Image (spheres, rainbow, N blue to C red):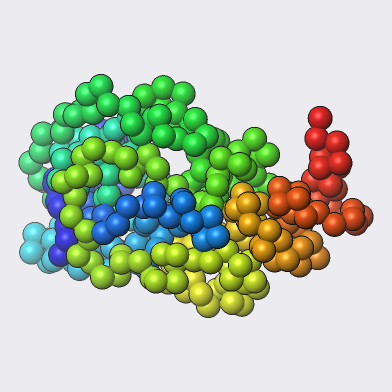
Amino acid sequence: MDWMERNAARRGDPLVLWPRAKSIIVLGMNYAPDHDPLASLERRDRGAISVYAQGDDYHDVIKRKLRRLAASIARDHRAEVKVFVDTAPVMEKPIAHAAGLGWQGKHTNLVSREFGSWLFLASIFTTLEIETDAPEIDHCGQCRRCLDICPTNAFPAPYELDARRCISYLTIEHKGHIPREFRKAIGNRIYGCDDCLAVCPWNKFAKAAHESQFHPRQELKHARLAELARLDDEKFRAQFRKSPIKRIGRDRFVRNVLIAIGNSSDPSLAPEANRLLDDPSPLVRAMAVWALAQLGALPQRRPDDDPAVESEWLYIASPA
Protein backbone atom coordinates (compact mmCIF):
# COMPACT_ATOMS: atom_id res chain seq x y z
CA MET A 1 0.00 0.00 0.00
CA ASP A 2 1.10 3.54 -0.73
CA TRP A 3 0.97 4.46 2.97
CA MET A 4 3.19 6.18 5.44
CA GLU A 5 2.40 5.57 9.10
CA ARG A 6 3.32 7.10 12.45
CA ASN A 7 1.99 6.64 15.97
CA ALA A 8 0.99 9.40 18.35
CA ALA A 9 0.22 8.45 21.94
CA ARG A 10 -1.46 11.64 23.12
CA ARG A 11 -3.78 12.35 26.01
CA GLY A 12 -4.79 15.86 24.95
CA ASP A 13 -7.84 17.38 23.33
CA PRO A 14 -8.19 14.93 20.40
CA LEU A 15 -9.09 12.13 22.79
CA VAL A 16 -12.12 14.03 24.03
CA LEU A 17 -13.78 12.45 21.00
CA TRP A 18 -13.37 9.04 22.65
CA PRO A 19 -12.09 9.32 26.24
CA ARG A 20 -11.23 5.61 26.56
CA ALA A 21 -8.66 5.87 23.79
CA LYS A 22 -5.04 5.94 24.89
CA SER A 23 -3.34 6.39 21.52
CA ILE A 24 -3.94 7.74 18.05
CA ILE A 25 -2.39 6.06 15.03
CA VAL A 26 -2.09 8.63 12.26
CA LEU A 27 -1.69 7.61 8.65
CA GLY A 28 -1.09 9.43 5.41
CA MET A 29 -1.82 8.16 1.92
CA ASN A 30 -0.12 9.60 -1.13
CA TYR A 31 -2.24 11.03 -3.94
CA ALA A 32 0.45 12.97 -5.80
CA PRO A 33 -0.40 13.63 -9.48
CA ASP A 34 1.79 12.59 -12.40
CA HIS A 35 1.31 15.99 -14.07
CA ASP A 36 1.42 19.69 -13.27
CA PRO A 37 -2.01 20.58 -11.85
CA LEU A 38 -1.57 24.23 -12.78
CA ALA A 39 -1.39 23.46 -16.51
CA SER A 40 -5.18 23.03 -16.66
CA LEU A 41 -5.65 26.68 -15.70
CA GLU A 42 -4.51 27.71 -19.18
CA ARG A 43 -7.26 25.79 -20.97
CA ARG A 44 -10.16 28.15 -20.44
CA ASP A 45 -12.68 26.02 -22.33
CA ARG A 46 -12.08 23.25 -19.79
CA GLY A 47 -12.82 23.02 -16.08
CA ALA A 48 -9.98 22.68 -13.59
CA ILE A 49 -10.78 20.12 -10.89
CA SER A 50 -8.65 19.66 -7.78
CA VAL A 51 -6.32 16.66 -8.01
CA TYR A 52 -7.88 14.88 -5.04
CA ALA A 53 -11.31 14.88 -6.72
CA GLN A 54 -10.30 13.58 -10.16
CA GLY A 55 -10.37 9.95 -9.02
CA ASP A 56 -12.64 7.96 -6.72
CA ASP A 57 -13.80 9.36 -3.40
CA TYR A 58 -10.86 9.10 -1.01
CA HIS A 59 -13.19 8.67 1.99
CA ASP A 60 -14.38 5.32 0.60
CA VAL A 61 -10.99 4.15 -0.64
CA ILE A 62 -9.12 4.90 2.58
CA LYS A 63 -11.84 3.77 4.96
CA ARG A 64 -11.85 0.26 3.48
CA LYS A 65 -8.09 -0.02 4.00
CA LEU A 66 -8.23 1.61 7.42
CA ARG A 67 -10.88 -0.78 8.69
CA ARG A 68 -8.78 -3.77 7.68
CA LEU A 69 -5.77 -2.36 9.52
CA ALA A 70 -7.86 -1.45 12.58
CA ALA A 71 -9.38 -4.93 12.65
CA SER A 72 -5.94 -6.52 12.71
CA ILE A 73 -4.87 -4.24 15.60
CA ALA A 74 -8.02 -5.13 17.52
CA ARG A 75 -7.51 -8.84 16.88
CA ASP A 76 -3.77 -9.04 17.52
CA HIS A 77 -3.69 -6.76 20.57
CA ARG A 78 -7.18 -7.25 22.01
CA ALA A 79 -7.72 -3.51 21.80
CA GLU A 80 -10.74 -1.39 20.95
CA VAL A 81 -10.49 0.80 17.86
CA LYS A 82 -12.35 3.58 16.07
CA VAL A 83 -11.44 4.86 12.58
CA PHE A 84 -11.78 8.40 11.20
CA VAL A 85 -11.31 9.64 7.63
CA ASP A 86 -12.35 13.27 7.61
CA THR A 87 -15.71 12.20 9.05
CA ALA A 88 -15.57 13.65 12.58
CA PRO A 89 -14.14 16.74 14.31
CA VAL A 90 -10.62 15.32 14.38
CA MET A 91 -7.86 17.89 13.84
CA GLU A 92 -5.94 15.66 11.47
CA LYS A 93 -3.20 18.11 10.50
CA PRO A 94 -1.99 19.07 14.00
CA ILE A 95 -2.16 15.43 15.09
CA ALA A 96 -0.23 14.33 12.00
CA HIS A 97 2.37 16.99 12.77
CA ALA A 98 2.67 15.72 16.35
CA ALA A 99 2.98 12.16 15.06
CA GLY A 100 5.88 13.03 12.77
CA LEU A 101 4.24 12.67 9.36
CA GLY A 102 5.07 16.23 8.40
CA TRP A 103 4.54 19.84 9.42
CA GLN A 104 1.82 22.37 8.75
CA GLY A 105 3.19 24.65 6.07
CA LYS A 106 2.50 28.33 5.62
CA HIS A 107 -0.57 27.35 3.58
CA THR A 108 -1.82 25.49 6.73
CA ASN A 109 -1.76 22.12 4.96
CA LEU A 110 0.51 19.26 5.94
CA VAL A 111 3.85 19.06 4.13
CA SER A 112 5.99 15.93 4.05
CA ARG A 113 9.64 15.76 3.07
CA GLU A 114 8.82 12.53 1.21
CA PHE A 115 5.40 13.27 -0.30
CA GLY A 116 5.28 17.05 -0.47
CA SER A 117 1.77 18.46 -0.10
CA TRP A 118 -0.06 15.43 -1.47
CA LEU A 119 -1.24 13.39 1.52
CA PHE A 120 -4.68 12.23 2.57
CA LEU A 121 -4.84 11.86 6.35
CA ALA A 122 -6.66 9.30 8.47
CA SER A 123 -6.51 8.10 12.05
CA ILE A 124 -7.22 5.12 14.26
CA PHE A 125 -8.12 5.84 17.87
CA THR A 126 -7.32 2.86 20.09
CA THR A 127 -7.21 1.72 23.70
CA LEU A 128 -3.80 0.25 22.95
CA GLU A 129 -0.83 2.02 24.59
CA ILE A 130 1.64 3.07 21.88
CA GLU A 131 4.92 4.90 22.28
CA THR A 132 4.81 8.47 21.01
CA ASP A 133 6.79 9.51 17.94
CA ALA A 134 8.67 12.81 17.81
CA PRO A 135 6.90 15.65 15.97
CA GLU A 136 8.31 16.88 12.66
CA ILE A 137 9.98 20.28 12.57
CA ASP A 138 9.01 23.10 10.21
CA HIS A 139 11.06 23.12 6.99
CA CYS A 140 9.34 26.05 5.20
CA GLY A 141 12.17 28.48 5.91
CA GLN A 142 11.80 31.80 4.09
CA CYS A 143 9.73 30.34 1.25
CA ARG A 144 6.35 31.96 0.63
CA ARG A 145 5.39 30.58 -2.78
CA CYS A 146 2.11 29.17 -1.48
CA LEU A 147 1.13 32.55 -0.02
CA ASP A 148 2.04 34.59 -3.09
CA ILE A 149 0.23 32.42 -5.64
CA CYS A 150 -3.19 32.46 -3.95
CA PRO A 151 -5.63 34.03 -6.46
CA THR A 152 -7.93 35.46 -3.76
CA ASN A 153 -5.33 36.45 -1.15
CA ALA A 154 -6.79 34.00 1.34
CA PHE A 155 -3.71 34.05 3.59
CA PRO A 156 -3.72 37.13 5.85
CA ALA A 157 -0.38 35.93 7.26
CA PRO A 158 1.84 32.83 7.07
CA TYR A 159 0.14 29.84 8.73
CA GLU A 160 -3.23 31.62 8.69
CA LEU A 161 -6.09 30.94 6.26
CA ASP A 162 -9.25 33.01 5.79
CA ALA A 163 -11.49 30.22 4.52
CA ARG A 164 -14.12 32.74 3.38
CA ARG A 165 -11.70 33.80 0.63
CA CYS A 166 -10.41 30.32 -0.26
CA ILE A 167 -11.46 29.00 -3.69
CA SER A 168 -11.69 25.46 -2.33
CA TYR A 169 -14.19 26.64 0.26
CA LEU A 170 -16.10 28.83 -2.18
CA THR A 171 -16.50 26.17 -4.87
CA ILE A 172 -17.13 23.21 -2.55
CA GLU A 173 -18.42 24.15 0.89
CA HIS A 174 -20.16 27.45 0.16
CA LYS A 175 -23.79 26.70 -0.59
CA GLY A 176 -24.99 30.07 -1.77
CA HIS A 177 -24.05 32.65 -4.37
CA ILE A 178 -20.30 33.22 -4.61
CA PRO A 179 -19.48 36.88 -3.87
CA ARG A 180 -18.77 38.95 -7.00
CA GLU A 181 -15.36 40.03 -5.69
CA PHE A 182 -14.01 36.47 -6.07
CA ARG A 183 -15.56 35.31 -9.34
CA LYS A 184 -12.90 36.58 -11.74
CA ALA A 185 -10.12 35.18 -9.56
CA ILE A 186 -11.75 31.74 -9.63
CA GLY A 187 -10.90 31.47 -13.33
CA ASN A 188 -11.81 28.01 -14.62
CA ARG A 189 -11.54 26.26 -11.24
CA ILE A 190 -14.84 24.41 -10.96
CA TYR A 191 -14.09 22.23 -7.92
CA GLY A 192 -11.38 23.17 -5.47
CA CYS A 193 -8.01 24.79 -6.00
CA ASP A 194 -4.50 23.30 -5.92
CA ASP A 195 -2.41 26.42 -6.43
CA CYS A 196 -0.86 26.65 -2.96
CA LEU A 197 -0.22 22.90 -2.90
CA ALA A 198 1.21 22.65 -6.39
CA VAL A 199 3.94 25.28 -5.96
CA CYS A 200 5.44 23.81 -2.79
CA PRO A 201 9.16 23.06 -3.41
CA TRP A 202 8.92 19.86 -1.36
CA ASN A 203 6.79 18.33 -4.11
CA LYS A 204 9.98 17.63 -6.05
CA PHE A 205 10.42 14.59 -3.82
CA ALA A 206 6.90 13.30 -4.35
CA LYS A 207 6.21 10.30 -6.56
CA ALA A 208 2.92 9.76 -8.38
CA ALA A 209 0.35 7.85 -6.35
CA HIS A 210 0.37 4.07 -6.77
CA GLU A 211 -3.28 3.66 -5.77
CA SER A 212 -5.14 3.32 -9.07
CA GLN A 213 -8.41 4.62 -7.60
CA PHE A 214 -6.73 7.99 -7.05
CA HIS A 215 -5.65 8.25 -10.68
CA PRO A 216 -7.68 10.82 -12.62
CA ARG A 217 -10.65 9.79 -14.68
CA GLN A 218 -9.96 10.99 -18.20
CA GLU A 219 -13.31 12.77 -18.44
CA LEU A 220 -12.39 14.85 -15.37
CA LYS A 221 -8.77 15.57 -16.19
CA HIS A 222 -9.76 17.83 -19.09
CA ALA A 223 -13.51 18.33 -18.63
CA ARG A 224 -15.17 20.50 -21.27
CA LEU A 225 -17.23 23.33 -19.82
CA ALA A 226 -19.84 23.05 -22.58
CA GLU A 227 -20.55 19.42 -21.67
CA LEU A 228 -20.59 20.05 -17.94
CA ALA A 229 -23.07 22.91 -18.34
CA ARG A 230 -25.56 20.47 -19.89
CA LEU A 231 -25.72 18.17 -16.87
CA ASP A 232 -29.13 17.78 -15.28
CA ASP A 233 -29.43 16.15 -11.86
CA GLU A 234 -29.65 12.60 -13.21
CA LYS A 235 -26.66 12.95 -15.52
CA PHE A 236 -24.68 14.71 -12.80
CA ARG A 237 -25.25 11.83 -10.37
CA ALA A 238 -24.31 9.28 -13.01
CA GLN A 239 -21.13 11.07 -14.10
CA PHE A 240 -19.87 11.66 -10.58
CA ARG A 241 -20.79 8.33 -9.07
CA LYS A 242 -18.11 7.35 -6.50
CA SER A 243 -16.61 10.83 -6.81
CA PRO A 244 -16.33 13.40 -3.99
CA ILE A 245 -17.78 15.94 -6.44
CA LYS A 246 -21.17 14.26 -6.17
CA ARG A 247 -21.72 15.54 -2.63
CA ILE A 248 -22.03 19.23 -3.61
CA GLY A 249 -24.96 18.49 -5.89
CA ARG A 250 -25.70 19.48 -9.46
CA ASP A 251 -26.79 23.08 -8.81
CA ARG A 252 -23.65 24.16 -6.95
CA PHE A 253 -21.49 22.40 -9.51
CA VAL A 254 -23.17 24.09 -12.49
CA ARG A 255 -22.90 27.41 -10.61
CA ASN A 256 -19.13 26.86 -10.64
CA VAL A 257 -19.15 25.85 -14.31
CA LEU A 258 -20.96 29.06 -15.22
CA ILE A 259 -18.37 31.17 -13.42
CA ALA A 260 -15.70 29.39 -15.46
CA ILE A 261 -17.70 30.04 -18.64
CA GLY A 262 -17.90 33.71 -17.74
CA ASN A 263 -14.13 33.78 -17.32
CA SER A 264 -13.42 31.86 -20.51
CA SER A 265 -13.50 34.78 -22.98
CA ASP A 266 -15.02 32.23 -25.35
CA PRO A 267 -18.23 33.52 -27.01
CA SER A 268 -18.99 30.03 -28.34
CA LEU A 269 -19.94 29.09 -24.75
CA ALA A 270 -22.59 31.81 -24.52
CA PRO A 271 -25.43 29.54 -25.77
CA GLU A 272 -24.78 27.17 -22.87
CA ALA A 273 -25.17 29.99 -20.36
CA ASN A 274 -28.16 31.45 -22.21
CA ARG A 275 -30.02 28.15 -21.99
CA LEU A 276 -29.51 28.13 -18.22
CA LEU A 277 -31.30 31.47 -17.76
CA ASP A 278 -34.44 29.32 -17.48
CA ASP A 279 -32.95 26.72 -15.12
CA PRO A 280 -35.14 25.71 -12.15
CA SER A 281 -32.33 26.63 -9.74
CA PRO A 282 -31.93 30.33 -8.87
CA LEU A 283 -28.30 29.57 -8.01
CA VAL A 284 -27.77 28.54 -11.63
CA ARG A 285 -29.88 31.32 -13.17
CA ALA A 286 -27.99 34.03 -11.30
CA MET A 287 -24.62 32.77 -12.50
CA ALA A 288 -25.96 32.42 -16.04
CA VAL A 289 -26.72 36.15 -15.96
CA TRP A 290 -23.22 36.93 -14.68
CA ALA A 291 -21.51 34.62 -17.20
CA LEU A 292 -23.35 36.11 -20.17
CA ALA A 293 -22.52 39.63 -19.01
CA GLN A 294 -18.82 38.72 -18.85
CA LEU A 295 -19.01 37.35 -22.40
CA GLY A 296 -20.83 40.44 -23.66
CA ALA A 297 -23.77 38.30 -24.71
CA LEU A 298 -26.46 39.18 -22.18
CA PRO A 299 -29.95 39.17 -23.79
CA GLN A 300 -32.79 41.51 -22.94
CA ARG A 301 -33.55 41.49 -19.25
CA ARG A 302 -36.21 39.04 -18.14
CA PRO A 303 -38.02 39.36 -14.79
CA ASP A 304 -37.22 36.81 -12.08
CA ASP A 305 -39.03 36.20 -8.81
CA ASP A 306 -35.83 35.28 -6.99
CA PRO A 307 -34.14 38.27 -5.27
CA ALA A 308 -30.60 37.01 -5.91
CA VAL A 309 -31.23 36.56 -9.63
CA GLU A 310 -32.87 39.99 -9.80
CA SER A 311 -29.83 41.40 -8.03
CA GLU A 312 -27.56 40.07 -10.78
CA TRP A 313 -29.70 41.68 -13.48
CA LEU A 314 -29.75 44.99 -11.60
CA TYR A 315 -26.01 44.91 -10.97
CA ILE A 316 -25.31 44.35 -14.65
CA ALA A 317 -27.54 47.28 -15.51
CA SER A 318 -25.83 49.61 -13.03
CA PRO A 319 -22.61 48.05 -11.65
CA ALA A 320 -21.62 51.22 -9.84
Q: Residue at x 38, y 70 (%)?
A: 217
Please state the horizontal and vertical placement of residue 197, each as a whole percent of the image.
Answer: 34, 43
Residue at image point 23% right, 37% down: 201
Q: Is residue 235 above or below residue 196?
A: below
Q: Nearer the viewer, residue 33 or 248?
A: 33
Q: Is residue 109 above or below residue 300?
A: above
Residue 140's x, y, as percent? Answer: 23, 28
Decide if residue 197 is on the left or right side of residue 239: left
Query: In front: 298, or 202?
Result: 298
Q: Residue 178 appears at what percent x and percent y?
A: 64, 44
Quarter of the image with the C terminus in it: top right
For this view, does 237 lie left or right of residue 77? right
Q: Nearer the viewer, residue 201 or 4?
A: 201
Image coords of residue 232 (percent x, y) = 65, 73
Q: Tell me if 201 is positioned left or right of 164 in this view.
A: left
Quadrant that contains the N terminus: bottom left
